[in-house]
Image (cartoon, rainbow, N blue to C red):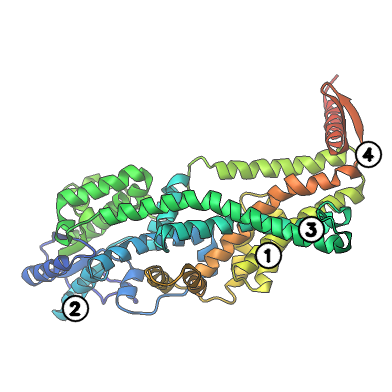
Amino acid sequence: MSESQDGPAELPEPSGEGRITVVGTAHVSQESIDEVEATIDEERPDVVAVELDDSRYRQLKGKEPDDLAAGDLLHGNTVFQFLAYWILSYVQTRMGKKFDISPGAEMLAAIERAESIGLGVSLVDRDIQTTVQRFWARLSTREKFVMLGGLMAGMGPPLQVGLWLGIALGAFFVIPAEILMGPLLLPTGAWLTTPVPILGGFGGILISLADGAIIVMAIGLLVGVPLSFLFKRFQTAEETEEFDPADLTDADVVTAVMEEFRRFSPGGAEALIDERDAFIAHRLVSLREAGYDVVAVVGAGHRAGIERYLENPETLPPMESLVGQQSSSRFSLYRLFGYAITLGFLAFFVLLALAGVENALLLRLFGAWFLVNGIIAGGLALLAGAHLTSALVGGGVAWMTSVNPLLAPGWFAGYVELRYLQVNVSDISRLNEILDDEESPMADILARLREVPLFRLILIVALTNLGSMIASMLFLTTVLPIFASDFTCQTTTMFGPIDGMGCALIEGARNGADILRGFLPV
C-alpha cells in the first residue's frame, strides 16, 4: 500500500502480524501529544495511521494549499459547505486558543515522531470536502442558522453585532426600493411631501432618503436587539462550558459531548462522526489484513466507534455508502417557495397574453422585471466587493434565476469573480485569526474580512442571490401596482366589478379555459 505523491512516503513492508492499537486524543490537549509520542515509542509499529486526509496533512506540514477550482467551489451548495467548514474550523481554533495548543498538534506530533524513527505514515480519514458536503446536506435549515449564529457571535460584542446585522438587513430592503422607486414615482409627485414647491422632485428625493434612513434604523433596532440577545446566549454557553484539558479524552466526557451534538443534529452527527468511524475502520482493517502493525491516532470521540468495527468488521457498512456526494432529501420551504414563484411568474404572463394584452405592455412589464432584478442583484454584488464585470453578469441573469429555484445569480457572479480572486483553503485560517481579534472595532473587522478572497466570494454569491430575492418581492408588491392604470379591462365577478390588471388575469383564465374546452370531446 502507498500514499499519494503529495502525502507521506510509501509504506514499508508489513511485519506480518496485523495488529491495531487505537489512541484516542483531544485535538487541543498537550497531554494527548505526550501520550501519542509515548505510545509510538513503546509500540514501535510498522505504520502510524492518523485521522487526516491529504489536504489537512499538507496544511499541517506547512505546504501551500491547492487553489480551489471554480467548478468545485461553486457547484451546487459548495460555497456554503465551505462556510460550514469555516464554522467547524473556527470552533476548534477557539478551543485551541483556550487551552493554548494548536489544533491538530497531536497529529503532527505523531507524524513527526514516526518519520524521525523511520516508521510509515498512513492517512486514514475521509476527504474533508466530502465530509463537509455530507454534513451540510444533513443539516436542517434551523440547524444551519444556529451554526451560523454561533459563528457571528464570535465577531464582537453581541449588541454591536446584532445592530450591525439589523441595519444591514434594513438597508438591503430599503435602499434598493429607494433607488428603484425614486425614478418611477418622481413624475407623479408621489414622494413630494414638502410644502416648498421650489424643491420640486429633488426635494422629494431628499425627503425620501431621510425617511428611508429612519426605516433602516427602525429595522436595525427591531431585528438587531433580538439578535443581540441570541448572540449573547451563544457567548454565555461558550463561556460556561469549562473543561479541564486532561478530561477531554475521558470516555464519559467525550460521550456526553457527542450525545449533546447528536441531540442538536442527528443527521450532522451521522456525517461528522458515525460515517467517519466506519471509513477510518475500513482503512485500518485493510492495513491489518495486509499484515501491518499499526498505531492509529484518532480523536477521542471516534475511538469507541472505530474499536467496535475493528472487533466486528463484518458490521461495517459498504465503503461505497460512505463516499460521494450526499443529496439532501429534506423538505425545503425555500425550494417550495422558489417553485411557487416560477409557476406564478409563468402563469402571470401566460394569462395576460391569453387576455389579449398588447405586446408593448407585456414588453414593458418584462423590461421592468429585468431592470428591477438587474439593478438590485448587481448593486448588492458591487456592495459585496465584486468587480463590475461580475456584477453585470449576476445582474444580467437575475431576471431568469429569480424564477428558477435550481439556479442562482450568485453562482454566475462568483464564476466570473474567480477570474480576479485566488481562493484556497488557507483563507479559512486567516478568517479565524481575524475573528479572534476581540479588540478591533466591528467596522475594522468587517473590512479585514472582505480582504480575504474566500470571504469576499461567499459575500458576493450570498448578496447577489439576496438581491434577486428582494427584487422579486419589490416587483410583486411595488412595481406591478404602477402598471395597473395601463390596463383598460373591466369585468364583473361574483365578488363585484373588477378592473385593471386583475380583470386581465381573469379574462386570460377564462380564455384559457375556453381553449382547453375546445380540445375536449363533446
Q: Earlier in the sequence, mark 4 or mark 3?
A: 3
Q: Is residue 395 left or right of residue 429?
A: right
Rounded to the nearest angstrom, the CA distance separating label 3 from label 1 is 16 Å
Distance CA(mark 2)–CA(mark 1): 54 Å
The disc label shown at residue 182, or none: 3
Closer to the chain start, of discs 2 and 3, is 2
Q: Is residue 342 above or below residue 36?
A: above
According to the picture, the residue beneath numbered tag 1 turns out to be 379
Contact (Cβ within 8 Å) of mark 2 with mark 1: no
In the rendered image, residue 257, in percent from the top left (x then y), is placed at: 25, 50
Mark 1 residue element:
helix
| Labels 2 and 1: the sequence-earlier one | 2
Q: Which residue type carries mark 1?
A: Gly
Q: Residue at x 71, y 50 (%)?
A: 474
Q: Secondary structure at mark 2?
A: helix
Query: Residue 115 has which mark?
Result: 2
Instruction: Find disc 4 in the rendering and name its residue.
Output: 488
Comparing marks 3 and 1, which lies closer to the viewer?
3
**Residue 397 seen in this snapshot:** no
Q: Where 321 falls versus 352 (above or below)?
A: below
- The one nearer the camera, 361 or 187, is 187
Residue 265, position in %: x, y?
A: 36, 45
Look at the image and tell me in which quarter the N terminus lies.
bottom left
Q: Nearer the viewer, mark 4 or mark 3?
A: 3
Q: Amino acid at mark 3?
A: Gly
